[in-house]
Amino acid sequence: MNKKIGYGIALILLLLAPFGLYPVFLMKLLCFALFACAFNLLIGFTGLLSFGHAAFFGGAGYIAGYALRSLGLPMELGLLLGTATGALIGLVMGMLAIRRQGIYFTMITLALAQMIYFLCLQLRFTGGEDGLQSVPRGKLLGMVSLDNDLILYYLVLAIAVAGFALIVRVVHSPFGQVLKAIKENEPRAISLGYDVDKYKLLAFVLSAALAGLAGSTKTLVLGFETLTDVHWTMSGLVVLMTLAGGLGTLVGPIVGAVLIIALENKLGDLGSWLASSTGVEWFNTIGESVTIVTGFIFIVCVLLFRRGIVGEIVALQQRLSRR
């Protein structure tokens, strides 16, 4: 009951948020929150550390952007095609990597993701280093123009909420319980008769599809897609979001995504404000040092908050309830 009340309050705040904050920034937060939740479904509930999620996120963004700009497809079909692309890449990558475990699985996903990166760099339709530019937002159901940021925000919010609800449903389903069993004790799950590789592959494809949906939606919001989204650093960024927020918790990746993306976007504004207020030009370099700040957050989480922000809060509540 408490969780439902919390979700309800969060939804009300999100519905009111664009009247006080910049809608495009909020939409970017929602896209990365969905991306982090998709990644957490794989590592937090299945125990598979993928370093190739940038391939699903960015690859789907390129396909969705190309479908909207060059093929002239409706917005709904563009997002659907991007999501299907993420799922297809996940299926191929999963079939090649899923039989390996530990660091071998991680390195295979990283190598395959880098192959996608070089394809995006070389293929003509992606725009190479210039990226895919001028992607139109189109119309919702062919009638409602999405050029209005407020209308698009509520569409992105609906997509993010639907994606999160799907993840919650999967986690609490019998399928999700098997995934947890595989994470906790894979040999015992095998001894109980479960086809472990099949379950892990299904989780991998589902996570890839949701990551593809997040990447497609981000391309729709910003109107462009670049190589940054398919580079291995994007995979590292989503790992950081999940660890900072709370690995294996439902809300943790959302908190981590908000923290990291807000830092990336607001450090530059803070540096400019300090430079203009004090007259010290050095403060303008603060925005360029965001990687140092995120690295510091990662170190703090590893040393002091190993469960992440939400994980530590949950653990504290459990200790207090026992007392």
Image (cartoon, rainbow, N blue to C red):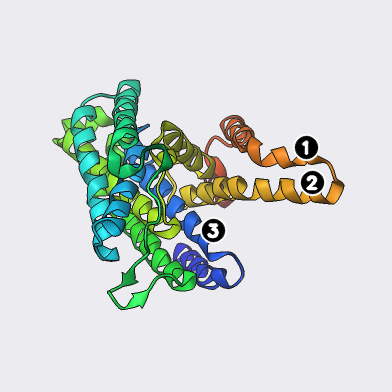
Question: Mark 1 = which residue?
Answer: 282
- Residue 38 x, y percent position in the rendering: 36, 47
Quadrant in the picture for residue 70: bottom left
Front residue of this view, candidates 276 and 300:
276
Q: Is residue 319 visible?
A: no
Please say if 253 is above or below 160: above
Check disc 2 and give the amino acid type.
Ala
Q: Are marks 1 and 2 in contact (CB under 8 Å)?
A: yes
* Front disc: 3 or 2: 2
How far apart are the alpha carbons under marks 1 and 2?
A: 7 Å
Q: Is residue 231 visible?
A: yes
Question: Mark 3 = which residue?
Answer: 25
Task: Indicate which disc, 1 or 2, sits on the residue closer to the N terminus.
Answer: 2
What residue is at 39 percent from the left and 54 percent from the top?
219
Question: Can you tell which mark lies on residue 275?
Answer: 2
Front residue of this view, candidates 263 and 42:
263
Q: Residue furthest bottom?
A: 143
Check disc 3 and give the amino acid type.
Phe
Check disc 1 and give the amino acid type.
Trp
Task: Indicate which disc, 1 or 3, sits on the residue closer to the N terminus.
Answer: 3
**Is residue 134 shown left or right of residue 23?**
left
